[in-house]
Image (cartoon, grey):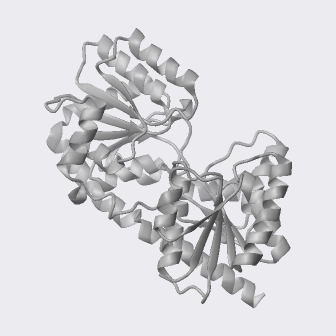
Amino acid sequence: MPDLPANFTLLQVTPELETGGAEQTTIDVAHAVVAQGGKALVATRGGRMAARLEADGGRLAQMPAQSKNPLVMLGNAARLIDLIRREKVSLVHARSRAPAFSALWAAHATKVPFVATYHGVYNAKSGLKRWYNAVMTKGAVVIANSEYTREHVIREHGVSADKVVAIPRGVDLSRFEPGVVCAERIESLRRAWGVAADERRLTVLLAGRLTRWKGQGLLVQAMALLKARGEDKVLLLLAGDDQGRKGYRAELEAAIAQAGLQDAVKLVGHCDDMPAAYLLADLAIAPSLEPEAFGRTAVEPQVMGRPVMAADHGATRETVIPGETGWLVAPGDAEAWAAALLEAVEIGASGRQSMGQAARLRARRLYSVDAMCEATLKVYARVLGLERSS
């Protein structure tokens, strides 16, 4: 890890610490800064992951950072200015657009360096939206969470290529380690989800919040196609919160019932034990309808030794190697997904195990949380060096 200056204090600003890749990365980087002897503050509304931040030695600065109301954003800027001065913050790191405005204003007012992570390929159908998105490029360095995102930032915003650094998200290799997951954790999930101990079907896990673009509906269509052909060799588990999207959840439930798939597709809700969930499954699936900027749920299962079936666009083209660590499938094409699921059945347990081992070796090498944190701390050191030399 690069050496940070004495008394280094990092302030990260993110809407919430509820669930998701950006939130996990926030906590991972805070932990790395504390491990280096620095202080790590996170300004956020809070959420279920806040306890983990504090357990790792980070500190929560609670404020309505999720708000897009201009008056609240101005209020947040004032709160951040006070926090930066009081805690002698060395660097501000924004992780989402709305709070990035408050963070940028506060950083400018206090003359503290500012960086931002471009966590997603944000849609911009108007000049105003493009301006809104561009706040993430106003720092000394822009961190992109994949090469796919990096190329988008350079192309979309005309940012100099040497200012944009691709740092893939990292996976905690000590947590996502098959050897530390006891049989009881897997058995507990099996019971909670109603998966039979002697289940012979290919158990496929789609982990992700229930939102249309994540592709749960597409997979239900693919399962209906298989059932119509008399194929009943797949059990699909949909793990994720509806986060208030009751209409979409009801739509999925209706589609499952209409196709008579109640025994083949299970909506199992939020899961706190993803390492055990991946070991319960034979295969992880990521059928996103829109390109993923990184796609954590295509990488974590590979670290756990599971092959992955993902949509053939976005950053999953970087994280999944077809025929070696998994499958890349035409986005939005239910027929193609049905065919790919059958292929995963037909290669058998030994074929899937070989893919899973190749996936594990590659993902551990490229996507560790340590590599991600080291690269991020190098950016901090670079920015602080630029500030000192300017």
Total marks in image:
0
Give left or right: position of 333 versus 104.
left
Q: Residue at x 72, y 59 (%)?
A: 136
Give left or right: position of 67 versus 152.
right
Image location of residue 273, percent across then percent down: 35, 48
Task: Examine the image and state in which quarter residue 6 appears.
Answer: bottom right
Front-most of 89 and 320? 89
Q: Can residue 6 be seen here?
A: yes
Eyeballing the image, is 58 above or below 16?
A: below
Give left or right: position of 174 versus 378.
left
Task: Examine the image and state in which quarter residue 266 appears.
Answer: top left
Image location of residue 230, percent across then percent down: 25, 13
Front-most of 57 and 157? 57
Give left or right: position of 292 versus 160.
left
Eyeballing the image, is 231 above or below 78?
A: above
Image location of residue 257, percent across then percent down: 40, 12
Image location of residue 106, percent across then percent down: 80, 67
Q: Residue at x 47, y 60 (%)?
A: 52
The quadrant of the image that shows the C terminus is bottom right
Front-most of 12 and 288? 12
Q: Can residue 321 be seen here?
A: no
